[in-house]
Image (spheres, grey):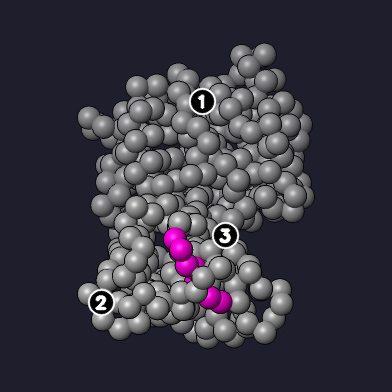
Amino acid sequence: MYEGKWVSAIIAAAGQGKRMNLPINKQYLLLGGKPVLAHTLETFQRCLFIDEMIVVVQAEERSYCMENIVQHYGFDKVAAVIPGGAERQESVYKGLKAVDERCDIIIVHDGARPFVKIQDIESSIRQAIAHGAVGIGVPVKDTIKIVDEQKIIIDTPQRSKLWAIQTPQTFSYSLLLEAHEKAREEGFTGTDDTVLVERIGHPVRICMGSDENIKITTPADVHIAESIMKKRKGADMRVGLGYDVHRLVEGRALIIGGVHIPYEKGLQGHSDADVLLHAIKDAMLGAAGLGDIGKHFPDRDERYKGISSIKLLIEVKNMLRQKGYSVNNIDATIIAQAPRMAPYIDEMKKNIAHALSISIDRLNIKATTTEGLGFAGMGQGIAAQAVVSILQSE
């Protein structure tokens, strides 16, 4: 939630993409090795203000989207994948009917706009809370002409007043629902959601968007998208290394990666002593030049006594966000002779991916023994090490 408001996002991905002249829907074209729709959903997954996503696709694509996009990349904010209508407006209306009953703010975004920036999503939410309706866009760069049926220019609008509208478009839920139901009642079809709200007399604000926030509609757009991908890959990347070790003692729960593991001993520490998450947090902080967990969560502070390391991991994520960074990928290793970690690794990955708002494919966790050597081999303790790369947030 943001400021106590439940925020739902409708991702409109039910278009047929006829202008692409391809055998597959444009949302599933690979861009940088990942489907266009997966790029879009990942940005909304990472946005802290978003509580849920409703993905609207063609009816015959529901299973494919769920299995190959939502589940494959671990987008757990997706509450439902639903079939769309014959027109985009109908698809959005179906999305409005599928959101959580707690929804206060609704965002509508094109699935084929994979380069939306998190800060633009957040800005639109703030503006919608304040004013009820907002669209993002950019001022047009070319002079626009109005022509008649004979292709004769009949007017030249003042360019300074012209904007190219994009998505996301963000509204009070009740306002957008009213606008859609009014349009349905009158048989009106608009080109976007802002025009429906304009029709019922509510002012719609405009927020500055980004020239990179293109909608992939034609083959030429794919080439532009590839250029944007190359540019973004050149963004500031940093890498951090984390290492932690805790003694195994009786009378403590064994918690690793946020998972309670049945065992005769647990790890000793001021917090829950989650050795894996401690290593990951240290790596994150190191990559961002923010010191270590002892600096931010000292073991002398009673606020952190017995605290869940998942909660602290979320705090570290927010520290990185404030510096303009987000986690790109994690590779971590748990070093323990016993118990066996393999049965719990998938659950660990889900916990960590959810806390960091990243897809599971950006996370790797391994476990190894020391062949009976050293403190880990003798069962005296468990260690973990992690390498984390972070990227400048989009």
Instruction: Give the Cα separation between the discs numbered 2 and 3.
Output: 50 Å
Q: Position of residue 156 (x, y in %)?
A: 55, 43
The answer to which of 308 and 66 lies nearer the viewer is 308
Q: Is residue 342 shown left or right of residue 131?
A: left
- Name the front one of labels 2 and 3: 2
Magenta stretch?
263-269
Question: Looking at the picture, which amino acid does disc 2 mark?
Answer: Gly
Q: Position of residue 139 (x, y in %)?
A: 55, 53
**Picture quadrant where residue 197 is located:** top right
Question: In the rendered image, which residue does mark 1 sit on?
Answer: 91
Question: In the rendered image, which residue does mark 2 sit on?
Answer: 372
- Name the front one of labels 1 and 2: 2
Q: Secondary structure at mark 3?
A: helix
Q: Position of residue 109 (x, y in %)?
A: 52, 41
Question: In the rendered image, which residue does mark 3 sit on?
Answer: 119
151 is higher (above) or lower (below) than 51: above
Q: Secondary structure at mark 1?
A: helix
Question: Looking at the picture, which amino acid does disc 3 mark?
Answer: Gln
Q: Secondary structure at mark 2?
A: loop
Instruction: Give the Cα separation between the discs numbered 1 and 2.
Output: 60 Å
